[in-house]
Amino acid sequence: MISTAIRLARVGSASELAAAVLMGLGYPCVMLAALIPNLWFFAAAGAVTYVADWYLHQKNSYLINRLNKVRAGLPIRFLLRQLLLILLLAREDLAEQPVFYAAVACFLLFYGLQAPQGALATLIRLRRTMPVVTRNIDLNAVRIPDAPPKALLNRSAEKMLHLDVPAVAGVIAAAATGRNTLAYAGVAATLALGLLYIVALVPYIRRKRRVPPAGAVLKAVGTWLGEYQPTVALYFSGSDDSAYQVNMWLETMEQIDGRPIIIMRERNLVQKLQPTSVPILCVAGGQHLMAMDFSSVRVTLYAANVGKNIHMLRVPTMKHVFIGHGDSDKLASVNPFSKVYDEVWTAGQAGRDRYALADVGVRDEDIVEVGRPQLAPIKSWTGTPANPIPTILYAPTWEGWDNNPGNTSLLLAGENIMKRLLDAPRPVRVIYKPHPFTGLVNKKAKAVDERLQKMVAAANAARAADPRWAGEAAAAQAAHAAARAELARIEARIAQLAAPGRKGGDEAEESRVSLADPQRLAELKRLREEWNDAYWRSSGWWEHKVVTGTEPKLYDCFNESDGMVSDISSVVSDFIASGKPYAVTDSAELGADEFKRQNTAVRAAVILTNSAAELDELLAAVADPAADLLAEDRRVLKRYLLGPDEPTSMEQFNAAVRALAAKAEARNNGVAQRLAGQRIGELDQEADGAAGEPVAAADTVAEQGAEVTPVAP
């Protein structure tokens, strides 16, 4: 029941739900106390509203956002409480007393102070905002001062409003005791603190505290681009939850032939990227991006099909490639938008065949098979479980934007799958890793996810009480404690290394200080490997796990498991790289033959119905190689989906980059020769008798951008 209430209230936990309920009850109680009147009831109810409000803001509760939408935002709630205090004083027959006038004057003056405080805080933020956010790019050509203390600007409006607490407390105390000096002291404290807040903000509007003007910053970025001369770009735009689509390509970009750069469009996503040595340039404004000189870039890679891609696709001097963020039989893998790119790179022959079958206008000669470089960390199966009992990963995908019941197994089969795994006659360990988007469209999927997590917790509790596992737990207790201590040590060190610069710096300051440090990056990589090892050692090989955060990564879960249950998604295609047995759920109930016909990646899978009765076949294959009837099918399918093992995927990828860069160079040279110095679309100056030096053709083409009309070769 509580979980249902949490879901309906759109809050994240039971404590948030309790705070929301207290706040919802608190304000009516404050009103009732003012009308009765009752000072102590008012004080208690008012304190509850202060604490509940503060807690919900600290948690960034969705409820706070909803209150703002219905004109019950934070300033209104504070004003309401103050007006009710004035009403309380009137009901206590204090309307003609000095304490009443002191309270009224205080709140009027206090609201007068909020205007300059809010204006200053907003002005400082605006003047600290650069047109770009960067990582690993040297911006020493411009002076970027340190950010103001985070305490001044973080939730500044909320902090200012809470400065009314001394006045409210003083007035209530004065009304209760008859000592007006308490009210005067509270009023003086509130007004003094408000003035001090304003005074503390004033120094940060001075010129030397501001970041340089947009023009100076863009000029510095242009200078850096001219010196660095990037040749391969990864371009990305996406939602708040899409940073993983870039993160999966970071290691590939670090190993790419040439001088890589990552170009992004959403400022908030930069903070969500993992540490990398590749330069990152985030340009939020389309006009700024289109004014930059990317003439040295020969190949641009696109990980998602989004509208903002047009700002880079318009540049004719580079070749454009769709690489995507996964390889699966979903419709997203054959999006008709892919026609806009010069080439589409797929992992293997399967991707090529998908486009041919879909007939969406992508020509076969424009498809290049490059493997999947990201799959290098996935270990191949040895043929037998690594632990005394097998580990099965259940990694369902999310419900999808169209909410088709065939997208995810969670809705129709999730509980059946989990129950059969947890109650298997031959015990197995379950790792449950739901998709991070689960419940984004269909709240029923989120509800099932919560029930599955409870099932795993209950199964773990039952195993802890089972004599079969109690001895193992006692024997491993010291080792687990040591691993947990190691985890804490590693996490503390990672936190120190994760963000360069001082704590509390804003994105402008971080752009200044976040230059690549090879030693720091190498230590972070080593620590993450140690963290992953310690994570799995911190619990028993018989204990089920629920993995919902970014760590451990999906591929780490692959390596820890002996088999997997999933849905149609890139997770299945990636898991095939391990060679381990897997099962896929036919949630739409197409039937095994039709399901395999429509979905390449399931041709070597155990096909599950929504009852999950076929799971025994998967568990038998994991436990005994002799019972693994699909091993050869998986080997054949792996090559078809992911390409050959030799040359490596990274070698194939780099070869494709070099080949396409050569095509871009040849195209640019050909255009330059044909134009002989003319601007495309302009009249022949010599024919008009115009004088002047010809413009270099290659530069002319690069400058024209969207105004250029490409000439057919």
Image (cartoon, grey):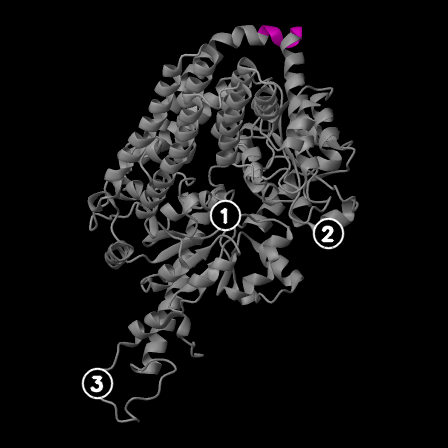
Earlier sequence position, callout 2 versus callout 3: 2
Q: CA distance from mark 2 to mark 1?
A: 23 Å
Residue that numbered label 3 is attached to: 692
Q: Residues within 10 Å of mark 3 (few under 14, many from 20)?
A: few
Please provide percent x and percent y for residue 435: 59, 37
| Residue 550 horizontal side relative to residue 472, left or right | left
Magenta stretch contains residue 708: no
Q: Identity of the amino acid at label 1? A: Arg
The answer to whether 28 is drawn above or below residue 216 in the figure is: above
Between marks 2 and 3, how big is the CA–CA gap?
65 Å
Residue toward you, 26 or 136: 26
**Tag 1's secondary structure?**
loop
Do the numbered discs 2 and 1 sit on residues whose CB atoms are within 8 Å? no
Q: Name the quadrant containing residue 505.
A: top left
Q: Earlier in the sequence, mark 1 or mark 3?
A: 1
- Circle 1 residue: 372
Give the number of marks. 3
Magenta stretch in the rendered image = 466-471
Q: Position of residue 667 (x, y in %)?
A: 38, 72
Q: Quadrant of the C terminus?
A: bottom left
Amino acid on which disc 3 is placed:
Gly
Tell me the residue that label 2 is attached to. Answer: 597
Main secondary structure found in the magenta portion: helix
